[in-house]
Amino acid sequence: MAAWQNPENFALWLSIVFAFVIALIGTFVYFTRLYFVRILREQQKLQKTIVAHQQQLLEDSILVQERERNRIAADLHDDLISKLNISLLSLHTAPNLDDLSTMLQDSIILARRISHDLSPPLLEQSNLYELLEGFLDPIQEHLKINLSYSCTIEKDLSNPTKLQIFRIAQEVINNILKHAQSTTLNIHLHQGKYFVGLKIIDNGIGFDINQNTQGLGLKNITLRSQSLKGVFRFNSKPQQGSSFLFFKKHHI
């Protein structure tokens, strides 16, 4: 009889094999549990990151809205009401009809600009290019800045999309006018069948992109881009002008 056929030896080997199988199963269960625990932790971490990101977006949205309210209030109080008060004072003292007419015309223009900022006129009847043109023409006349346009339109945009892109363009252009000290502004708009793209280029003093990431203007652009599921990018170097590109695919 072979040694392995001995009942005692057979029972020993069977016990060893059984123990090995149990150990193998236990090891597999242990590492499987570790794997699922790690996956669960990563999912929890991702969920916390998403919640924190959404909270930050909400806070940024509130800050942007408050900034817009403060800006409109300042325009009304410092500009429009001030002009109307001067006009009223002139009317009660020594009225000069020509000066009074000029001040009233300026007040009307200012009131129209504030109204346009709140809601662009003829939004439904105008395409995005016409909205931008209506916003930029008074700026060109007032600031004597050289503007150039190029536009191709192959597909209409919905009113909400049109308004959000218009607001993005407003934010970028207003920042250029306030800070860039540029003399030329080039705007390229393409509304294609599959995407819409907007590019704004100026020849101003530029800026360091790495040091301009916390402003409310950038947060405003970020929020509006995310709501459109679009992407944007700034390119700039000090003293070399800047460019802004926005891109959004059409959802079919």
Image (cartoon, rainbow, N blue to C red):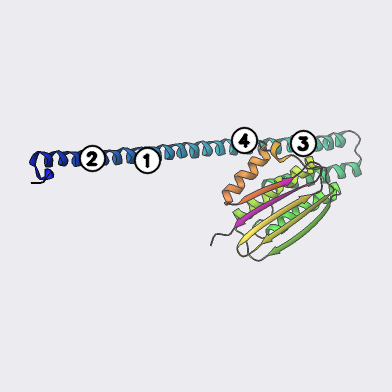
- N-term mark: 1 or 4: 1
Real-space Cα distance between discs 1 and 3? 67 Å
Q: Which residue is mark 2?
A: 20
The answer to whether residue 117 is seen in the rendering is: yes
Question: Which comes before the other along the chain, label 3 or label 4?
Answer: 4
Query: What is the crowding at mark 3: few (fewer than 14 residues within 10 Å), some, or many (at least 20)?
Result: some
- The kind of residue tagged 4 is Leu
Q: Which residue is drawn at the image coordinates 78% and 43% (left, top)? A: 206
Q: Which residues are magenta?
A: 235-251
Badge number at residue 63 = 4
Question: Label 2 to label 4, Cα distance in Å?
Answer: 64 Å
Q: Nearer the viewer, residue 154 or 79?
A: 154
| Residue 231 x/y as whole percent | 62, 50
For discs 1 and 4, the disc positioned in front in the rendered view: 1
Tell me how far mark 2 sits from mark 1, CA to CA: 22 Å
Circle 2/circle 4 CB separation < 8 Å:
no
